[in-house]
């Protein structure tokens, strides 16, 4: 029988065959607070309750840790959204009105906005973190919405036009509000209520996008 870890054992010993979630969560917090360049591996290790050496059992570089944060802490939200969109049985405008509050809630309550700001601010010096964020978050999120719009166009529910551009026109205010919150609210700007903003935006944009309203 394999020896069980004692309560005093380092946390990583409980994760012999998998990345420890403690490290990923700690890295998410440190990246959100400090940014990528200023994030220190010893601080991530301390918050995770492991030794700095233990980090290297799972990750060779800080970029590897960032990739794990995106894949383990953020990408699952994208997967849940995709499942919801593909299974939704109703028309496009109903889908968007049900989807927008869920996405707005994630943007409002999670630390994702801080990571977005970090990626934008540090992408020049660390282009790989921008690539990871684009490939695993932005491209997938836009792809889900673009696919939904394409299918709605095929059903005659959405006007003709580039579906990817339609997708950005829907999601753009959400991204703008998150960046505004993380950049200007800390220096005294009044924040936007993101769920309310998205509701008002949909009230304005959907009548011009859909070909007819449901009865």
Image (cartoon, rainbow, N blue to C red):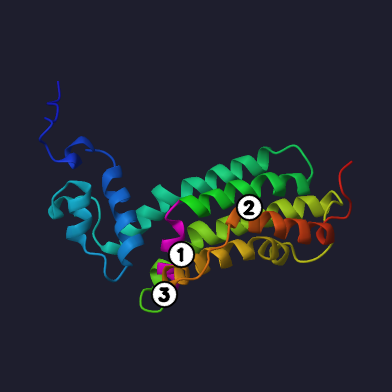
Element at badge 2?
helix
Instruction: Pick the quarter of the image with the C terminus.
Output: top right
Point out residue 145 in the picture as x, y percentages from the top left corner: 66, 54
Q: Marks 1 and 2: which is nearer the front?
A: 1
The residue indicated by pointer 3 is 121
Distance of mark 2 from mark 3, alpha carbons? 26 Å
Q: Earlier in the sequence, mark 2 or mark 3?
A: 3
- In magenta, the rendered stretch is 110-120
Residue at the image point whose x is 80% and y is 66% from the top: 161
Relative to 162, 30 lies left or right: left
Depicted 31 relative to depicted 127: above or below? above
The residue indicated by pointer 2 is 144
Labels 2 & 3 near each other (Cβ < 8 A): no
Depicted 138 relative to depicted 90: above or below? below
Q: Earlier in the sequence, mark 1 or mark 3?
A: 1
Distance of mark 1 from mark 2, alpha carbons? 19 Å
The residue indicated by pointer 1 is 116
């Amino acid at each position: 029988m394999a020896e069980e870890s004692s309560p005093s054992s380092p946390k990583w010993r409980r994760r012999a065959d998998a990345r420890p979630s403690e490290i990923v969560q700690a890295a998410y917090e440190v990246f959100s607070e400090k940014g990528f360049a200023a994030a220190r591996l010893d601080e991530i290790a301390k918050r995770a309750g492991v030794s700095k050496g233990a980090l290297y059992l799972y990750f060779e570089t800080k970029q590897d840790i960032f990739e794990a944060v995106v894949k383990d802490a953020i990408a699952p939200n994208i997967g849940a959204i995709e499942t919801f969109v593909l299974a939704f049985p109703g028309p496009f405008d109903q889908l968007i009105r049900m989807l927008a509050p869920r996405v707005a809630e994630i943007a409002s309550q999670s630390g994702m906005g801080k990571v977005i700001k970090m990626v934008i601010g540090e992408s020049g010096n660390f282009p790989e973190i921008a690539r990871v964020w684009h490939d695993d978050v932005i491209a997938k999120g836009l792809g889900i919405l673009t696919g939904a719009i394409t299918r709605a166009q095929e059903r005659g529910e959405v006007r003709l036009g580039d579906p990817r551009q339609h997708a950005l026109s829907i999601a753009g205010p959400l991204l703008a509000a998150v960046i505004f919150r993380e950049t200007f609210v800390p220096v005294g700007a009044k924040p936007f209520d993101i769920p309310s903003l998205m509701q008002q935006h949909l009230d304005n944009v959907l009548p011009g996008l859909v070909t007819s309203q449901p009865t």
